[in-house]
Image (cartoon, rainbow, N blue to C red):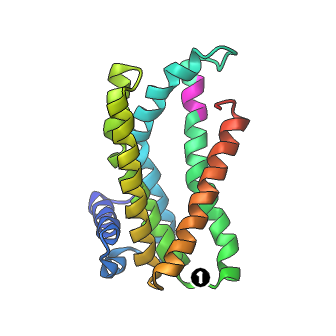
Amino acid sequence: MPTGDYVHNALTASWRMMWGRREANRMHDLTADGFWISFFAIVIALPPLVVGWVAVSDDLAGFPGGFGSRLGVVVRLAIVDIGTWLFPLALLAVVSPYAGIQKRFVHYVVAANWGTAITAWIMLPPSLVRLIQGEPGELVVLVSIVLFIFTLVLIWRLTDAAYERGPAVASAVFAGMLVASLFTLFSLQRIFGLT
């Protein structure tokens, strides 16, 4: 388990990369251990993710056709979100050698894992409002959309900083990961009956 200082340093590095500071890449632990430790970011992201799962679970648990208990829905939402986090990275590992981007694969995964934890926290406010109010109002939906677009911009910038090969490569990797994430999300939602 990483220390608090280690986690703080990793989150700071990804945050700086999200703002275009490529030199922050050197703050990450890019060793084999650092690669695997970066998946601890899932634990850092759990609190805001759990709030989101609980906020949505009431709607899905009570949906006609029986989606099951609230806890069952939360567990399925967790599997879907964690799968959507991990599967695109596994796919990138397979594709990277053929795309000529394998040299920066570790840089990207480490930065992206910690960056995804940051974006989970950025998306927390709308989830909290939904958890308290129940049905989201138009303002909450609008804020969610704006924050989602903002996080996409941050992740694109992080991708650009991680690969250091210019906007074309960053855009290609970003688009590929976005498509893979959406495909995984919709597929897992269908498999687990959360459509």
Q: Is residue 106 above or below residue 115?
A: below
**Circle 1 crowding by C-alpha within 10 Å: few under 14, some 14–19, many from 20:** some
Q: Determine the residue positioned at 56% across, 85% down.
A: 103
Q: Position of residue 137 (x, y in %)?
A: 36, 26
121 part of magenta stretch: no
Q: Is residue 14 left or right of residue 103?
A: left
State the residue position of label 1. Answer: 101
Q: In the rendered picture of this protein, how many numbered marks are placed on residues? A: 1
Q: Against 173, is 63 above or below?
A: above
Residue 34 location (% of width, % of height): 45, 70
Question: Which residues fall within the magenta stretch?
Answer: 72-76
Q: Quadrant of the C terminus?
A: top right
Q: How would you classify the magenta stretch by its main secondary structure?
A: helix
Determine which quarter of the picture holds residue 15.
Answer: bottom left
- The answer, for residue 160, to whether it is visible in the render is yes
* In the image, residue 75 lies in the stretch drawn in magenta: yes
SS assignment at label 1: loop
Quarter placement of the N terminus: bottom left
Q: Position of residue 150 (x, y in %)?
A: 36, 55
- Name the residue: 43% across, 27% down: 55
Query: What amino acid is at disc 1?
Result: Ile
